[in-house]
Amino acid sequence: MRIGFAHPNKRNYSETFIQYHIAYLKPIFVLTGGKRPYEDQDGISIFTFPLSEPIRIFIKRLLPGLYEHFFTYFLVKYLQKQRPDILLVEYGTTGCGVVDACIKTNTPLAVHFHGFDAFEKKTVESHLKEYQKIFRYAKAIIAVSKDMVERLIELGAPRERVHFVSCGVKTHEFFGAEPAKSDKLVLAVGRFAGKKAPHLTIKAFNLVLDKHPDAQLIMIGQGAMFASCQALVEELQLKHAVKLLGVKTPAEVVDYLRKARVFVQHSMFNPENNDSEGTPTSILEAASAGLPIVSTRHAGIKDAVEHGVTGYLVEEGDYESMADFISILLDDASLAAKMGVQGRKKMQQEYEIELQTEKLLTAINN
């Protein structure tokens, strides 16, 4: 099958799932560059005339209404030349950018929604008309959680063309955690964004220290809330126990996973804009490594974590209960190890990247 592939963000450290898809699906081309992706994996533009880049930027900035038609014209030519059997697009917003060219060339389209594109209020409101076009035309609409399946149907997607395919994890790369032997290290990995509520993870850990003053919290990632979380650590006088490390390489993340006792993430609907997770790959990677998870009953986390078996789940905003469950696992290293074993087994049986990719291929071939 000749798969074309398009996604918006050429350099985004947190979107490992996109790189997984590219590696395993082996598309005939990959386009990137925003809502209307225009550049292939070699940096070659779909705009094929002299001085195309300054002209493209000029039109996009000063004549945005014209840019949509300008882009579609050249994407049509590109698709006619490449002739993919289907164009798989990451994010609903990117699907909005390419759907007209697909219709004009009769190119089958599959759109993979991930989180904000299905839930964030302004995004949905501003793209809803275009979403309706996608829902009418697309061969397949992919959701990464069961909650998202229902959300897309609520927005107008036909149920028979909406498929639940979670993100996957490379279990052969994420392994080796030994909670039974580890120090009392609590780990969080993810963007410092409202829907991940890193401030509530810090507040939960502040309560954990009452019972476990020798515990440590390490948080890896960057984002809009990084500075405010640094300030919160200062305010709560936690600099001795909480380390905000910024972005780390995948290899460094694996190393920290292997040293930790517990993985935590307080995902929730962002009260400011209704933004939501899909299925966080960081949780899949931590479970694959063999760590118990303490998180929230939110989005695809409910699918990936079995409460009382592979970790613990609390209601969104309930950082006190999160602190209680973290403390239980710091008290009982053997329980942490047992849950970690069950979590890894679940990842191998249900979330292995090859398995999820096969599900994705089945969905777009259906």
Image (cartoon, grey):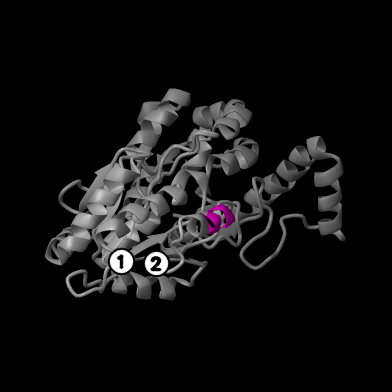
Whether residue 304 appears in this view of the structure is yes
Tag 1 or tag 2, which sits nearer the N-term?
A: 1
**Which part of the image, by quadrant, shows the N terminus?**
bottom left
Residue 234 % position (x, y): 51, 59
Q: Is disc 2 placed on a helix, strand or loop?
A: loop
Q: Crowding at label 1, few (<14), some or many (≥20) Cα neighbours within 10 Å? A: some
- Labels 2 and 1 touching (C-beta < 8 A): yes
Q: Is residue 231 above or below residue 74?
A: below
- Say left or right for 343 vs 54: left
Main SS class of the magenta portion in the image: helix
The CA span between labels 2 and 1 is 7 Å
Residue 219 shown left or right of residue 35 in the figure = left
For disc 1, the marked residue is: 215
User: Circle 2 sits on which residue?
Assistant: 241
Instruction: Answer with left or right where residue 95 lies relative to residue 50.
Output: left
Q: Position of residue 133 (x, y in %)?
A: 57, 28
Name the residue type under label 1: Ala
| Residue 45 falls in image quadrant | bottom right
* Observer able to see residue 108: no
Residue shown at 37%/29% (left/top)? 150
Residues shaded magenta: 227-231
Q: Residue at x 41, y 29 (%)?
A: 151
